[in-house]
Structures are given as C-alpha cells and as structure tokens.
Amino acid sequence: MKPIRVLVVDDSAFARKVLRESLATSSALEVVATASDGIDALEKIAELQPDVVTLDLVMPNLDGLGVLKALSYEQRRRVVIVSMADGESELGIDALSTGAFDLVHKPTALAIDSLRDIAQELVEKVLLAGRSRPRFQAGKVATVTETVAPRAQTDRVVLIGTSTGGPQALTQLLSAFPTGFPAPIVIVLHIPAGYTGPLAARLDQACAIEVMEAVEGLRLRPGLAVVARAGMHLRLAAVGGEQRVLLDPDPAGSVHCPSVDVLFESAARSLGARALGVVLTGMGDDGLAGARAIVAAGGQLLTESELSCVVYGMPRVVKEAGLSSGEFSLDRMAAEITARL
C-alpha cells in the first residue's frame, strides 16, 4: 500500500519541523513538502496533489480559512487543522464548519516536548483523513415542518453523540428543527477544550432552536439543545421531577471527556424508555456501551448511515451490535427523530 502523502502548512519553521518529525513516526505517512503561508500552500496543493494537508489557521498573506475556501469540497475533507485554542477557537469552529476533516489542538507554548505530545493524535487523524472516502456531499436538509409535523409535547429527550465530522453534521441536523421543537436535546462531541463554547454560539445563531454550552444544574426544556463542555463529562439526573445537567471531570482517565457512553448510560438510568439516542459520524466506539444501556432500559437508538458519514465508525459499531432501530442519511435524520417523539 502506498503511503499517504501529506503537506504540512504552518508559518512557524519550528512547528513545521516538529510536525514533519511527528508524522514521520508512521511508515504509512510521507511528508511530501511544507508550506509557510496560505499562498505557498495553495501552490503546493495544486502542484503536488497531496492526500492530506495539515493546516495552521493564523498565517501571513492568506490564512487557513482562506486556504479552505479556495479548495473543493473533496479537498477540504482531507484537511486536518492544527491550531491553538484560546484566541483561535472561533477560527477552528469556522474551519470545521467550512468542511475541514478534523482538528488537533496545538499547544500554546511551542516547546518541542509540548508539540510532540500531540504526535499520536496527529498521526491518527491524518491516517483517518487519508483513508476516508466521503461519498456524499450534503445538500439542503429538509426542515421538520416540511416533512413530519412535531408533536406539541413529549417527555422524551434526544441524546446525540458524534466525533469526526460532528460540527458539520450538527449544523445540518439542528438547523432542520423548528422553534417549537418539542423535546430537549443533549449533545456530546469529541473536540478539544475551548471549542465547545464558540461552537454552541455558532449553532445558536444558525438554528431556530436555542443552543448553549452546558452549565452545572441546567434544567432541560423543549427547544433547547445543550452541548457538553469539552473536558467535562455530562450526566443527566432527575432533580425534583426535572431533568438537569451534572458536569463532572471524572473518570479523568477515560479516553474521551466528555464521553458519549457516560451521557447515554446516565440517560438510561434517569429516563428509561424516554431516551432517544442518536449516533452520528465519528471514529471509534464511544457510545456503544451507552447504546446497550439505553436499549436495555427500553429506549431507542438511531444511527447515521455510511452514505453521509465523514467517518463511519461510531454508528457502525452500534448498528453491527444490533442496537440501532433505524439507520438514516443526515438529510433524513431530523424527520426520523421527530417521528419518534
């Protein structure tokens, strides 16, 4: 098998050196060139046709967003953002919303040890981007009002888990729900700390329903979508007859924090048959154990089909375990969720 050819784009010569060395730890990757700004990057993309591009966002001449917007849909799906949080978090969300494959958080202190700490994550995401074969360019998603009229009231709660490709999928899905959507929505997305606040704000602007980042003790209510805060697990608990959000960093050693399993398992305990889980695009198997708990409690699971997934990992394992009661492409998911309320 030929190695995946990678172009590294960063305005820091030191960062380019360390990223090149990090990618070289995998024999399945070959760094074919580096670029120091956006103009240089576009020239080398046109000349070399790399399989994957790692892209810094803040650069002279042409920034990372400018590069992304100059690329085709297919090319954007091969871009892994390597960016700092803090002041760049909104740029990172912009990049993911524009179609970038995934994001790796670059440490703010550009010490060699700090940069090398991200080597394993970087290699994994570049390999995944190089091997993925997106076959579906999502177009207009029909709104619920165009398909299935929502019920006036429901006691169910929609629980969404997603990872790679999640920001784009959430934008398309949540924007299909009308203002009077009759159920609360709780979301876990694998994304670095510092990015969930800007993502929730972006979704709130783009959607008819209200979207906000999770806060301790928040009461769930119809028409509100809550995005779990990166670095904190989100659990649901019944308090005084109401469903409320509980935030907790433990178990700190879990692979993902927040974890879809943690959310789903708490929902199974707190909601029972009223839990409606939805597993969207993402790599790995986070959500599988939680899906088992929801089904055992009498709830339902829906999964995104391979047709529209950026990465058909998380939905696949739930489907193959026989836990999905329906598999749908993203353009149909809003209507299918509403039909089950």
Image (spheres, rainbow, N blue to C red):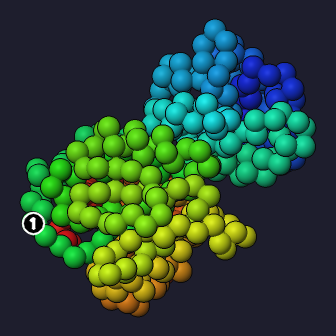
From this view, report whether residue 266 is shown above or below residue 65: below
Task: Give the SS element for disc 1.
Answer: loop
Q: Quadrant of residue 8?
A: top right
Locate the C terminus by quadrant.
bottom left
How far across and how far down the image is residue 228, in percent?
Answer: 48, 59
Three-letter amino acid code at disc 1?
A: Ala
Q: Which residue: 38% across, 71% down?
A: 244
Q: Which residue: 67% across, 18% down?
A: 59
Q: Which residue: 48% across, 80% down?
A: 265
Between 31 and 95, which is closer to the camera in this rendering? 95
Looking at the image, can residue 59 be seen?
A: yes
Between 339 and 110, which is closer to the camera in this rendering? 110
Q: Is residue 326 left or right of residue 114?
A: left
From this view, report whether residue 171 is shown above or below residue 341: above
How far across and how far down the image is residue 262, in percent?
Answer: 53, 74
Between 37 and 257, which is closer to the camera in this rendering? 257
How far across and how far down the image is residue 276, in percent?
Answer: 32, 74
Q: Is residue 257 left or right of residue 172?
A: right
Between 123 and 265, which is closer to the camera in this rendering? 265
How packed mark 1 is, by other alpha carbons closer than 10 Å (few <14, some 14-19, many 20 or more), is few
Which residue is farthest top?
61
Q: Dot 1 corresponds to which residue?
A: 152
Q: Is residue 291 left or right of residue 109?
A: left
How far across and how far down the image is residue 314, in percent?
Answer: 51, 65
